Image (cartoon, coloured by chain):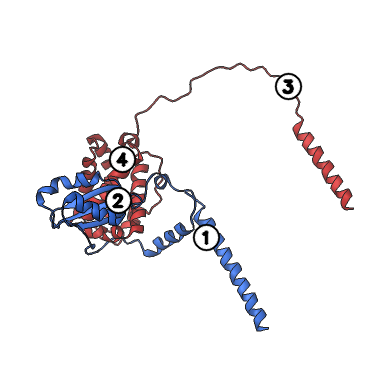
Amino acid sequence: MKKSFFIRAGKAGLALAGALVIGLTIWANWEESTYTQQNTQTAVYKTYDISNVKPEQYSQIEKRISLLNGVTACSLNSTDKLLGIMFITSKISGAEMNATLNTVLGSKISEREFGSKTGGCPVTGVKYLVLHIRDVFRFRS
Amino acid sequence: MKKITFVLAATLGVMLFTATSCKKKTETVTETVYVDNTPAPGPPSLYTRLGGIAPISAVVDKFITNCASNAFIGPRFSTTASDPYRLKYFRYNLIDQICAGSGGPCQYKGQTMLQAHTGMNLTNAEFDTLVGQLVKAMTFYNVPATEQNDLATILLPMRSDIVGH
């Protein structure tokens, strides 16, 4: 009696899980990607410490780094001696970026942790969790 | 019984097929008159003048890095910039907003400016700094003054929804 109950419960659980996967897959692929998503690539943003770089180089850094393959934007904060770079990870990895910066700037460049995060975007993590789940089940380009 | 049902169904199907496929041929005489109904070309949209999605994306990326590395407003962007997932959708929304606002083929699906900024208590000084970073980004990419002003005309009215909430 117990065995048949567990077997039935197991089957019901599997059916429920299957329905959930199918439902999530349909929901995630219901809408096509936006025009922007179809025409832009995902990029990441990282900050780098440029304390070892000579200040005379500062005026040229933004333009030089912006021209590197995979880099979409670069901004320098001379007061805090940091460089913010946005780059496409499918074209250049974080490790490759570090090595490239060392070569281009001729100094030891290290990634800097983000500073204080105060009063930022109030959009809750729940919204991004939903987007993340959608991306896991999405196969439509 | 089954055979009879099948034969009846097949017969009905054939009848339906022939009824719908047989058409009476009628001859009609038409005279083709060519009229040019194409509308007169208007001025190009701001989206076209900016160069399309690629230049807009480049300006947006430069704007984001300007803001995130700025000493005054940088902390406001740290949470978003340090999380690749948040950054991805923040970036998409910004590009969509400018693309759609300038007459491009995009559709902005993010929150309203009021919804997105309520709770942040942004000041006018922070908003002015933000605008300055956008101008810097456009200047970096040599966006002409006319297009910079046209874009500002679209974005500046958002101040009331962004500041002080």
Q: Chain under label 3?
A: B
Q: Which residue is mark 2?
A: A87
Q: CA distance from mark 3 to mark 2?
A: 66 Å
Residues indicated by labels 1 and 4 sit on the same polypeptide chain: no
Q: Is residue A106 left or right of residue B160?
A: left
Asked whether B163 or B24 is in front, the reply is B24
Amino acid beneath label 4: Pro
Label 3 CA crowd tier, 10 Å (few <14, some 14–19, many 20+): few
- Circle 4 is placed at which residue position? B55
Residue contact at pointers 2 and 1, CB within 8 angstroms? no
- Does mark 1 fall on the same chain as mark 2? yes
Q: Tell me which chain appears red.
A: B
Residue type beneath disc 3:
Thr
Is residue A8 at all visible to an observer of this figure? Answer: yes
Q: Which residue is mark 3?
A: B26
Q: Residues within 10 Å of mark 2 (few under 14, many from 20)?
A: many
Q: Is residue A51 left or right of residue B120?
A: left
Calculate the distance from the C-alpha at mark 3 to the C-alpha at mark 4: 57 Å
In the picture of the structure, the residue carrying the numbered disc 1 is: A24
Q: Are marks 2 and 4 in contact (CB under 8 Å)?
A: no
Q: Which chain is blue?
A: A
For discs 3 and 2, the disc positioned in front in the rendered view: 2
Return the chain for callout 2: A
Q: Position of residue A108 (x, y in %)?
A: 17, 57
Q: What subunit carries mark 4?
A: B
Say what amino acid the circle numbered 2 marks: Phe
Circle 3/circle 4 CB separation < 8 Å: no
On whether disc 3 and disc 1 are found on a single subunit, the reply is no
Determine the residue positioned at 41% across, 40% down: B105
